[in-house]
Amino acid sequence: MNMGTRIIADMYRDSVALMKISSSVTLLDGVKQASCIMATAANLELLREAGLIHEDPGARPNEVLIAVEAETEAALAAALDAAEAELRADPIVADENGVTSEPLRSIEMALDGNVEANFALIATPGPFAAAEAMKSVQLGLNVMMFSDNVSIDDELALKTQAEQAGLMVMGPDCGTAIIDGAPLGFANVVRRGEIGIVAASGTGLQQVSCLIDADGCGVSQAIGTGGRDLDSRIGGITTKRAITALGADPDTKVIVLISKPPAPDVANDVLEHAVATGKPVIACLLGLLRDKAGKTGVTFADTLEEAAHLAVTAAGANARAPGGLIDATLPGLNDDRRYLRALYSGGTFCYEALTMLGTTLDGVHSNTSSVGIQTLNDPWTSAGHTILDLGDDLFTRGRPHPMIDHRLRNDRIMAEGEDPGTGVILFDIVLGHGAHEDPVAAMAPALSAVPKHDDGGPVLLGFVCGTDSDPQGLARQRDAMVDLGVRLADNNAQAVRTAAAILEGTK
Amino acid sequence: MSDLFGAPLSVINVGLAQFADPIRNAGANVAEVEWAPPAHDEEIARALARLINRPEIEAANQTAFGRYLAAQPTLRGVGFARDVLDGLGDRTILHSGPPITWDDMCAPVRGAIAGACVYEGWAETPAEAETLAGSGEISFAPCHHFGAVGPMAGIISPSMPLWVIEDPVHNHTTFSNLNEGLGKVLRFGANSPDVIAHLEWMRDVLAPALAATLESLGDLELKPIMAQALHMGDEVHNRNGAASALLIKRLIPAALDAGLEPKTLSDVVTFINSNDHFFLNLSMAACKSMLDAAHGVPGSSLVTAMARNGVNFGIRVSGLGDSWFEAPASIIDGLFFPGYSTADANPDLGDSSITETCGIGAFAMAASPAIVQFVGGTASDALANSRRMAHITYGRNTAFTLPALDFMATPAGIDIRKVVDTGIAPVINTGIAHREAGIGQVGAGITHAPLACFSAAVTALAETIAD
């Protein structure tokens, strides 16, 4: 086997661009594996683990390293050349006179050419994101920070500075938003309508907006705040600003708030803000029990499904009734197959499942912490009922998120399939911009490898979070899942209830 | 936030290109930034972010740039270094670029210094001069520390004649040595007896003749000549044919009036006429004059000097006093004269990058398509260079316009923040010196100022700005 590396000095490419090049080079004849990375210590370690490099290639963090393993010397050289050529291919932009224009290299440069800009979408490595956001705010731009790994001190400083400037900072770690109908980050293509959403949770926002769409309603604005906005240290600065904006927005008739449990004083403050808008407010603060949350003027939802239902109803439309199971006879299971194995790509889905099942199933394990949940000693091996957030840093370190790259979850699906104790394998499929272009195709090999339920295997149970207008197409993905023998729920809450009912049936 | 919902969404997308199309498809405007980590350094990125759109910096830059524009460099005369440079010691030799010790100097600079020692009569031979120079008895300083600039080695010793340029607006004087012509010359480190003899001729014949001529001519404003030369195909750094001709046009009648000996007149005119770079040193001193006017404004992020000593590249910044911010000088990738290659090239050398600092030279490359091939590019590269530099400069100098770009004013006032934020390095046209002393110019090319100078300056400027 022939291995080789090449260093491209003074070049930066984002991880997605590098992955695309890695995968296209891997497809070349005679190439076993190939990877292009920014040569950071962490990335070099990954290549070492993958067996693509053995000794130190001598690359620095501001250099791109190409590493290839190929069957022949010629294939190796061709692959290295192909990767380098692709890296060096500069997009050439020409105006109508054929004059090539300069690529925009900075926010300020972009603003010089477009003084109307009012929003910056920042998705850089975390350590640099705070700096880019600070520039944006100082230049008078509202900001969405897709980036994570931003310190809470930086977040507070940014949000405070933005507040003083009359601007909004969404994020850090804000995966999704829909502003003026434009999907930002990992967003679904949903109808425009009268329901405004403020969410500290990306998948929560996606689920609720998709369910609203499924009921024929639409979204006016969907504002992500970042997961920590309702932390007492941040105090809901962005959430409150977003609520105020939705309150003043004539297109918004109903306001939906979505988050994991907020700090109690912050929750109170935020809810008072929401009530003060005078508009119907639906609050889905997962894990915050309804009776404890009581607040006049706010309707509480226990699940994302219920939040969507209440919002659609408040908007005056007919909503599908929440609370049921899948519309089919529940499959039975052998006595040995007693355990739930929920493998989520969406963190909020995992959290919702834990809040729904933590007190009803015995011995639920997870990689995330929640009341009544046992932490897995080894997150790579399930124990009893296991509910995993595979988008957790623990699993994604050095890898793309499981919504983009299904390999990690596929491996886990096959591992659960081989476990004779597995009763139900539950999973989410998230569509929309930014997600994998064809999740079913990506998952099909793993799903097909699981022993068939008819042959005594576990039940495959899933749900698709998406809309028909999404690039992947909701109906197409659902149909393909059904063809693979997957039982489909409409949403996470229904899937979780169904899983519990199937397992209950085996007792 | 009312802005956000009230105005049409217009997004600047930073980092992940795939996010742009969905936004665009939804009907919103998207500008895509091809982002790279500023300076590849988190701390520098943070320091930079603090400086973006800071009111005190914007105000300081406005002041500095206003002074740069207002400067009116005027040729007043020729004088000897020991007479016109304040505080120049008896045994001080000035060199180009940032400060450097004898031990660290490159061969062409050492050769030129040795030649200057012989010229001054401090040593009999270049070998003896080198021993003297290494003994500590000679002090060395950058030309820039005395308001002066010199091309290549940039050597100025006490009895060398200098151009004296005054800016009456800011009552400030700057200087440059006189161009020796082409071939074997001190500025490339040559120091043979004929080189010294030529220097002596410049001292004894040329300088007095020019002094008398200028006396007869009166004040000569230099910006109009530079501006006109830009319209005649010069970029007034690596190509000075038009500017030199314009200068000669002014000098000849005055020289005829100055009562010079016919032989002197003939020799002087022949010498000036034989050198298309005769104007270069005046262009440099005029640029130094404009940039000195902009220097010393607290908080200003504008670059007031870029200079190379053949080992290091250094910049100075208006708001950062006398500090130099340095990085290793690069080897220039250019076109070489027959028989020479990159292996023969000395790293970047000379104060002549003061022209680019001032918004001409490579910044005005669009004015000089003819030079573009010489420095290894196409005519459209020249236009692109001038356009690209506009992204790292504070403003435009309407005194210098570019016909090929519809008389666009040249981009000027390099802003260290923009350089670091965009990663666009200032472009420089330059000659290439042989790495050995005395061989001379071996080629010419385009180079870029090292980004590390600018990121170091950003860090320093951030330290001067309170939170």
Image (cartoon, coloured by chain):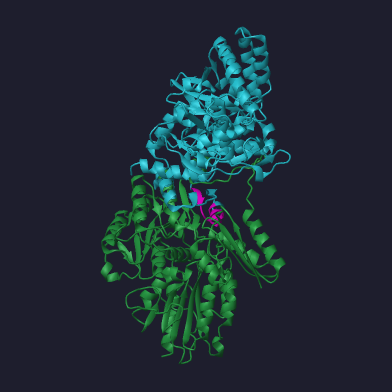
Chain colours: A green, B cyan
Placement of A2 over or under B375, stated as above or below: below
> A162 left or right of B290?
left
Query: What's the magenta region?
Result: B10-23
Q: Is residue B15 magenta?
A: yes
Q: Tell me residue A351's x, y (percent).
A: 39, 71
Q: Is residue B249 magenta?
A: no
**Nearer the observer, B13 or B134:** B134
Specify whether residue A392 is in view. Answer: no
Q: Quadrant of residue A78?
A: bottom right
Q: Residue at x 52, y 33 (%)?
A: B95
Placement of A12 over or under B466, stated as above or below: below
> B273 left or right of B27?
right
**Nearer the observer, A417 or A87:** A87
Q: Tell me residue B216's x, y (percent).
A: 56, 9
> In the displayed image of the protein, which residue is found farthest to the bottom?
A335
Q: Tell me residue A247's x, y (percent).
A: 35, 52
**Nearer the observer, A140 or A132:** A132
Q: Tell me residue A61's x, y (percent).
A: 51, 58
Indicate the quadrant containing the C terminus of chain B: top left, top right, bottom left or bottom right: top left
Q: Residue at x 66, y 25 (%)?
A: B276
**Nearer the observer, A264 or A370:** A370
Specify whether residue B128 is in view. Answer: yes
Total labels drawn: 0
Placement of B436 over or under B162, stated as above or below: below
